[in-house]
Image (cartoon, helix red, strand yellow):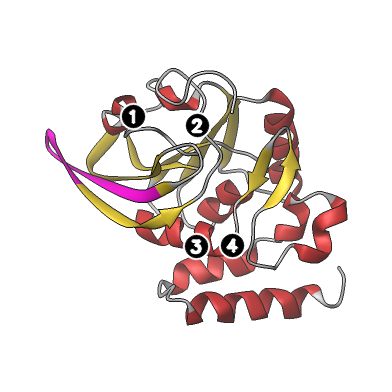
Amino acid sequence: MNAAVPVRRKVLIEYLREIGIRDERVLAAIAAVPREIFVPASFRHQAYEDYPLEIGEGQTISQPSVVARITELAAVDSRDRVLEIGAGSGYQAAVLAQLARFVFTLERLPRLAEAARARLSELGYDNVSVQVMDGSLGWRARAPFEVIIVSAAAPSIPRALTEQLTEGGRLVVPIGERRRQQLVRVVRHGDGFEESSHGPATFVPLVGRDGFQGQP
């Protein structure tokens, strides 16, 4: 390991505290995940900067502050089964795996899914399953889930996902246009859903039947 990495990681965690991340479990999870493994080699010196990085296939790894905010909003418990839509590099799934009982993460691009699966396996995450699927539809065969996180922007809240939440389950998803969204949390209460908005976000589009049609 580069000797500077632990220092950069510590600086990042202090920065996340300064901008309002309060859940120490979330901060510990981010501190435990080697983000440099989840970015291309040419970007590893930037792994602990707070901005997104390209990972190929027109996709990005979200900036650490966004990952922290989403994970905090999801209020992940050690008993929870989590569904993530948009595996990307596998970084968000690794953070979630530090907190949850099991993480199912779906990716529509086979090459990204294969690379994410290999990274997660190499790092010893045996409570994560990576599958190639249309994530906008969720995964009914494995539902229901206590938490669903969407790591891509949807034009509206996908009904298929809300239907796959448990009672009290939380869905966190960026909602809006292709280039500009609001981060929304949905909590299930019986047959009703409580929605709340948590600030602006910018994610690549969710492509699929209940996402944006066609390519990003």
Which of pointers 1 and 4 lies earlier in the amino acid sequence?
4
Which of pointers 1 and 3 lies earlier in the amino acid sequence?
3
Which of pointers 2 and 3 lies earlier in the amino acid sequence?
3
Q: Which mark is residue 68?
A: 3
Does dot 3 land on a helix, a strand or a loop? helix
Residue 85 on image: x %, y %? 49, 35
Q: Nearer the viewer, residue 115 or 101?
A: 115
Pointers 2 and 1 in contact (C-beta within 8 Å): yes
Q: Which of the two discs, 2 and 4, sits closer to the camera?
A: 2
- Mark 1 vs mark 4, CA separation in Å: 25 Å
Q: Report the residue marked by disc 4.
A: 64
Amino acid on which the number 2 mark rests in the picture: Leu
Residue 188 on image: x %, y %? 20, 42
Q: Report the residue marked by disc 1.
A: 158
Q: Residues within 10 Å of mark 4 (few under 14, many from 20)?
A: many
95 relative to 110, above or below: below
Q: Which mark is residue 108?
A: none
Q: Which mark is residue 206?
A: 2
Pointers 3 and 4 in contact (C-beta within 8 Å): yes
Amino acid on which the number 1 mark rests in the picture: Pro
Amino acid on which the number 4 mark rests in the picture: Pro
Per the rendered image, the range of residues in magenta is: 182-194
Residue 96, can we see it?
yes
